[in-house]
């Protein structure tokens, strides 16, 4: 799975991942690329897979933090 993600192949990674982790990967992908399209149903999908509110919150914070850092790095030409 890690090799697939490193290569940017989400679909291959999903085939090698348990359902709860796959749901989280899909959520992270959507939140990163299409944040305006996130709905309450997306978080509910994670709950249905067994993720707790603190775990979902932590995932959101980490995803947002990476987006922030990437934008700052881009703004300063770092990378």
Image (cartoon, grey):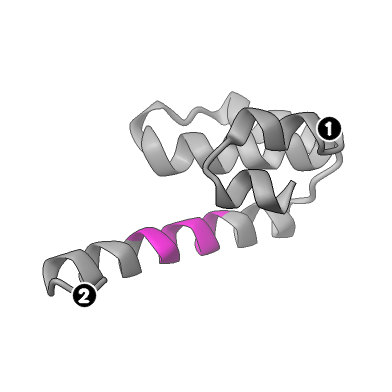
Residue drawn 84% across and 32% down?
19
Numbered badge on residue 38:
none
Question: Would you say 69 lies left or right of 47 here?
Answer: left
Query: Which SS type dominates the magenta stretch?
Result: helix
Horizontal and vertical percent position of residue 1? 74, 46
Residue 50 magenta: no
Residue drawn 64% across and 41% down?
25
Work out whether residue 52 or residue 78 is closer to the camera in this orientation and state it: 78
Residue behind mark 1: 19
Region of the chain picked out in magenta, as a range: 60-67
Mark 1 vs mark 2, foreground winner is: 2
Mark 1: few/some/many CA within 10 Å (<14, 14-19, 20+): some
Q: Sequence order check: which comes first, mark 1 or mark 2?
A: 1
- Location of the C terminus (image quadrant): bottom left
Numbered badge on residue 78:
2
Report if residue 46 is visible in the image: no
């Amino acid at each position: 799975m890690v090799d697939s993600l490193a290569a940017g192949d989400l679909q291959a990674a999903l085939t090698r991942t348990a359902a709860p982790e796959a749901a989280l990967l899909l959520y992270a992908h959507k939140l990163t690329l299409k944040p305006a399209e996130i709905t309450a149903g997306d978080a509910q999908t994670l709950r249905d897979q067994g993720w707790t509110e603190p775990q979902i919150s932590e995932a959101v914070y980490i995803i947002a933090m990476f987006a922030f850092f990437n934008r700052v790095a881009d703004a300063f030409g770092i990378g």
